[in-house]
Image (cartoon, rainbow, N blue to C red):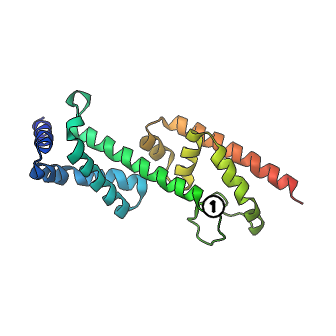
Amino acid sequence: MSDEITDQRLLLAICGGDKQALAILYDRYAPLLMAVGVRLTRDETETEDIVHDVFIEVWKRAHTYEAARGTVRTWLVLRMRSRTVDCLRRKIKRALAAPVQDTDDPNHFDHVLLRGANPAAHAHENEIRNTVLELPTHDREVLLLSYFQGLSVNEIAESIDIPAGTVKSRLSSARKKLREVWSSEHEESP
């Protein structure tokens, strides 16, 4: 409990412009926030940037903390998760907006969904991309977090704060729609 009082006092001091209080809070919670972020991004450098962004937000918005809604630790972790998910969503949007390229890079989004497909499958990339874009937002989000970021069902559930069963059903729905398009494309091909 004494750490919580100290955390709250640190936030009050930060509200007053105390940079030393921010440094103490950073030293106390940066390792935890790094662990949370790396689990989701799998990229230490990117996670460091997100942690710094969270503490910039703490500096600017410490006054928004409400003790009645949870501990300072919880508030910081929620800020970290939110910023990390935002970062993942931006990466997904950039991947979807990128032009279709012929590449051997197995991490390239256009080939993640086509992993193991024969070269003739590349003619259908635009159709698959369009199908992914047409998926309901919540289905598309879990599909891309699963395939593009390589997150497990439980990691997706934690990162977007929904039950694992919901993640499974959304993944199933998205895969079904993609299979339908893929099957119809192959049936039409000679």
Quadrant in the rendering for residue 69: top left
Query: What residue appears at the point 75 percent right and 63 percent down from the top-left corner?
Result: 121
Left or right of 130 on screen, residue 140: left
Observer-nearest residue: 35 or 87?
A: 87
**Residue 120 placed where, x, y %?**
78, 66
Quadrant in the rendering for residue 112: bottom right
Q: In what element is the residue under mark 1?
A: helix
Q: How many marks?
A: 1
The single residue placed furthest to the top in the displayed view is 68
Per the image, the residue denoted by label 1 is 110
Give the class, few, some or many, for how many residues have Cα within 10 Å of label 1's Cα (few <14, many ≥20): many
Q: Is residue 149 visible?
A: no
Query: What residue appears at the point 12 percent right and 39 percent down from the top-left corner?
Result: 12
Q: Quadrant of the N terminus?
A: top left
Q: Quadrant of the C terminus?
A: bottom right
Query: What residue appears at the point 82 percent right and 55 percent down from the top-left corner?
Result: 186
Query: What residue appears at the point 25 percent right and 51 percent down from the top-left corner?
Result: 56
Q: Is residue 32 above or below residue 163?
A: below
Q: Is residue 164 visible?
A: yes
**Residue 138 placed where, x, y %?**
56, 39
**Residue 76 placed where, x, y %?**
27, 43
Left or right of 99 on screen, residue 52: left
**Residue 158 placed where, x, y %?**
42, 42
Q: Is residue 149 above or below residue 74?
A: below
The single residue placed furthest to the right in the displayed view is 190
Left or right of 77 on screen, residue 62: left
- Residue type at mark 1 is Asp
